[in-house]
Amino acid sequence: MSLFSLFLLLLLSLHVVSTTARTTIDANSLAGDANSIPTKEYLVRYWNEQITNNLAIPPLLTSKVSPLTTAETTLFTQLAAQDAISDHLRSFCKAAQLLCFPDLSSYQLGKDDRFFYDVINGATTLAGGMNVNESVEPGKFFRELILRSGNVIRMPDLQLKTPKRSFLPRSISSGLPFSTSKLAELKQIFHAGDDSTLEKIMVRTLSLCEKAPIQGETKRCVSSVEDMIDFATSILGHDIKLHSTESAGGSKRDILIGRVKRIDGSRSGAPVACHDSLFPYMVYNCHAVPTLHVYEADILDPVSKAKINHGVAACHMDRSACSPNNEAFLELGSGPGRIEACH
């Protein structure tokens, strides 16, 4: 079984594990169903066609599928093909549960959006530059040797704080431009003004997606559950399992590490990790890195020893390509090529 991992803000995690080969499946057998049956039902079928181990599609994946009805999916697919989404943006964003606003002034911040507010107003973060905020959340990064049963460590905040968004059906996302060379078209579609917050958000994610892979890395940005499944299986094969951090239990407090287990990739591919990238619709930056070590561990209360969570951690063993100002180095007090960094 092979390992595929999906990270949410690098904190909430999904991981998948493959060692068996399988016969090739004709994915086109489901193509006609994409717009004719409810999205979740279609994705259950797609998962079952692609994954050989009879495991059900993970709830964390189905929770991110588009809320669009079959009629809405058909309508917006046609509008995307006609380059007419912009004329129906308000209804599109509302129905598809997207992040659409021309600038920060029109986005109403709630009590759970503090992190998003900080991200938007952090110029170095949105600009996609090499600098990071000087303050790094305690516990966000740690050394691999810390992942030992019996150690007490500080847990970072595991609460998801980015605005809620959903994947688009692939029939829609495939009809929308997705590159920095098409930025003008994207701005027109999503009504993003020049130098607006939304433009900066899109530029940052597109730039990350277009960044050349490091040595040995295979990467792809995905904007649908189908694309994510396809990328994972292209690396790991079709016998995969997802492991996820169960909850936000233990956030921002000291915790005791219980049982620790390393999760390997497949015989043919490295573990796959997918990182949530801010965009009007849900986009994940997926990559397979041979030097990635992935672990799962029980998280215990340090006093009562009761289990309060089950978490997943990833250790990047080769950080030589990172900037010296990377926040992992700021917290751990080191630099590129000198140490590994886990989160």
Image: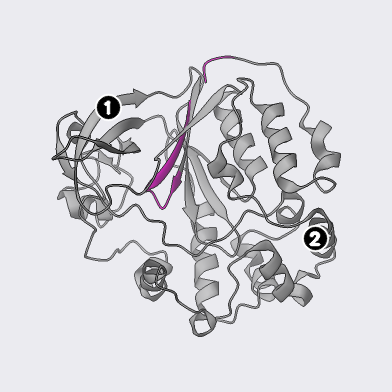
Question: What is the span of residues highlighted in magenta in the rendered image?
Answer: 7-20
| x, y percent for residue 147 | 22, 33
Q: From the viewer's side, name the closer residue of 316 and 42.
A: 42
> Rounded to the nearest whole Å, what is the CA distance between mark 2 and mark 1?
45 Å
| x, y percent for residue 241 | 52, 27
Left or right, residue 63 beside residue 130: right
Which residue does the image show at 50% across and 76% down from the upper left? 197
Left or right, residue 34 beside residue 337: right
Which residue does the image show at 77% across and 56% down from the upper left? 69
Q: Can you identify the residue that label 1 sits on?
A: 260
Q: Quadrant of residue 185?
A: bottom right
Q: Quadrant of residue 136?
A: bottom left
Tell which circle, 2 or 1, labels the residue nearer the N-terminal end. 2
The amino acid marked with disc number 1 is: Val
The total number of labels drawn is 2
Q: Can you identify the residue that label 2 sits on?
A: 72
Determine contact: label 2, label 1, CB under 8 Å: no
Quadrant the C terminus occupies: top left
Q: Quadrant of residue 137?
A: bottom left
Q: From the viewer's side, name the closer residue of 251 and 175.
A: 251
The amino acid marked with disc number 2 is: Glu
Which residue does the image show at 71% across and 51% down from the upper left? 169
Within 10 Å of the Cα at label 1, are there few (<14), some (14-19), or many (20+) other Cα atoms? Answer: some
| x, y percent for residue 256 | 18, 37
